[in-house]
Image (cartoon, rainbow, N blue to C red):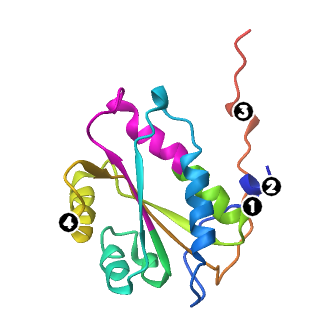
Amino acid sequence: MENIFHRVSIRKYEDKPVEKEKILQILKAGMQAPSACNQQPWEFYVVTDKEKILELSKATPYSGCAAGAPVVIVPVYRKEGLPVQEMAQIDMSIAQENIWLETDALGLGGVWIGIAPFEDRMALVHDILKFPENVEVFSLFALGYPAESRKQQDRFDESRIHFVE
């Protein structure tokens, strides 16, 4: 629960690389996510090339903050061979949340930048990174050592809970 109530969107990063071991731990958390029929549709591209990160930072009106990140993870999902293709984006959301929570647990900060379901954004990122044709881009996740801090707001609203007994 601590990470759930601590995690916030971090958009400013220290000029410091993120250790490969931490990136692998973050992706291990992502791959531990449940998925429909255990299809595990994910693959993850880890971008540290500054020029590519700058290009990715222009992919949406909201991705500018990625320009200062030392790492951008680009989760993609396979378009073929999945038993329940229609559930792939939901599966990816669960994996993305695990990634975010582990990022926070490791003392890093990140921000989830929505790409899917916007086909123009998906195609743009696909082209920037020259991905194979058999994958679709799901999101961008910029991360690094935080150069800002904020307190997580309390979003609990008991009026939105309804018991059917």
Q: Residue at x 36, y 27 (%)?
A: 84
User: Crowding near pointer 4: few (<14 within 10 Å), some, many (20+)?
Assistant: few
Secondary structure, mark 3, is: helix
Depth order, front residue of 60/13: 13
Per the image, the residue denoted by label 2 is 2
Q: Nearer the viewer, mark 1 or mark 4?
A: 4
Instruction: Provide the residue span drawn in magenta.
Output: 73-95
Q: Amino acid at mark 1?
A: His
Per the image, the residue denoted by label 1 is 6
Per the image, the residue denoted by label 3 is 159
Secondary structure, mark 4, is: helix
User: Crowding near pointer 1: few (<14 within 10 Å), some, many (20+)?
Assistant: some
Q: Picture quarter containing residue 102?
A: bottom right
Q: CA distance from mark 2 to mark 4?
A: 38 Å
Q: CA distance from mark 3 to mark 2?
A: 23 Å
Q: Are marks 2 and 4 in contact (CB under 8 Å)?
A: no
Asked if residue 44 is among those painted magenta in the image, a careful observer would answer: no
Q: Position of residue 101 (x, y in %)?
A: 66, 56
Q: Amino acid at mark 3?
A: Ser
Q: CA distance from mark 1 to mark 3?
A: 23 Å
Q: Picture quarter containing residue 24?
A: bottom right
